[in-house]
Image (cartoon, rainbow, N blue to C red):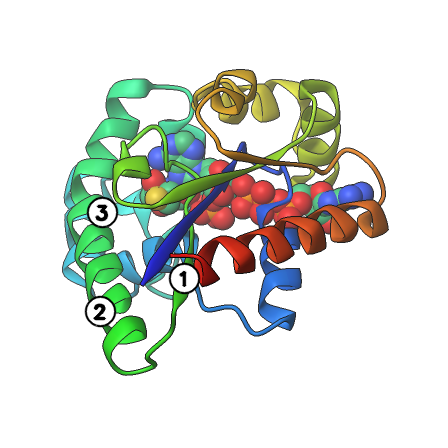
Amino acid sequence: MYRIGLTGGIASGKSTVVAILKSWGAAVIDCDILARQAAAPGSDGLIAVRQAFGPQALLADGTMDRAYIGSIVFQEPSRKKELEDILFPFIHRQIADETRRIEKIEKRLFLFLDMPLLFEVKYHSYVDEAWLVYVDPETQLRRLMARNNFTEREALARIQAQLPIDEKRSLAQVIIDNAGSLENTKEQVRLQWDLLMSRIRNL
Ligand SMILES: CC(C)(COP(=O)(O)OP(=O)(O)OC[C@H]1O[C@@H](n2cnc3c(N)ncnc32)[C@H](O)[C@@H]1O)[C@@H](O)C(=O)NCCC(=O)NCCS
Ligand SMILES: Nc1ncnc2c1ncn2[C@@H]1O[C@H](COP(=O)(O)OP(=O)(O)OP(=O)(O)O)[C@@H](O)[C@H]1O
């Protein structure tokens, strides 16, 4: 099964592109969802997060206080690493299990792995090609502040916790520029989809 890594900086538009790909029937593994499952109420992951970050890590209903954890880890790289060390083993296992299921049970010919940290965690060796959803840094900052109601400082902390989006450009084989209209993005995705289909047919 041919694997395509789909990545991009925070708020670059990965979910927007994934929605288009899914509407055309693509199989997609969403790593942000796996990360949420890794810290679901009652999970070993959440127990470990509580041990590491204290009782404030949980809201009254027993779910992880994502705003609180986010406010710590995106300010402090060592705390971010601590959180990743807890959650990544589960995420890696789930990616492997889901990939196997999609290949063996669903018998798909290709799969998109939607992974914000594809390059940071060196998963580009696990995929056959990498697609980058790109927006220029100014648009990224503006959209992130608007979507999450972040101050500029909060948004910059999250952006700077990732490999700079311009460095990601040099690591990707396909670039979707999502700084324009949604219609324009959809046209680019259509073109890349058609090219992908011919690459897969010629394997
Ligand atoms: C820190 C947390 C609690 C913040 O939760 P929140 O609901 O605010 O954000 P959400 O999970 O929707 O992520 C939004 C975006 O933040 C960025 N992001 C998330 N985790 C990280 C990280 N460890 N390093 C850099 N950027 C990250 C990604 O671009 C992601 O798409 C959460 O992101 C988390 O648990 N992160 C650790 C797991 C992880 O690394 N996930 C990335 C998928 S491999
Ligand atoms: N072409 C576009 N024009 C205008 N707004 C857009 C466009 N694409 C995405 N957006 C908006 O930008 C924000 C970020 O997009 P999206 O949520 O798809 O990014 P993401 O990369 O999945 O984010 P994250 O890294 O947090 O998972 C959203 O509010 C979305 O509605």
Viewer-closest of 75 and 165: 165
Q: Earlier in the sequence, mark 3 or mark 1?
A: 3
Residue drawn at 37 percent across, 37 percent down = 118
Q: Which mark is residue 100?
A: 2
x then y, percent, for residue 180: 83, 37
x then y, percent, for residue 127: 32, 46
Q: Residue furthest front?
A: 202
Q: From the viewer's perspective, tell me whether residue 137 is left or right of residue 33.
A: right
**Callout 3: CB less than 8 Å from ligand 1:** yes
Q: Earlier in the sequence, mark 3 or mark 2?
A: 3
Q: Quadrant of residue 104?
A: bottom left
Q: Amino acid at mark 2?
A: Arg
Position of 173 relative to 152 (above/below): below
Viewer-closest of 198 and 134: 198
Residue drawn at 66 percent across, 34 percent down = 144
Q: Quadrant of residue 133?
A: top right
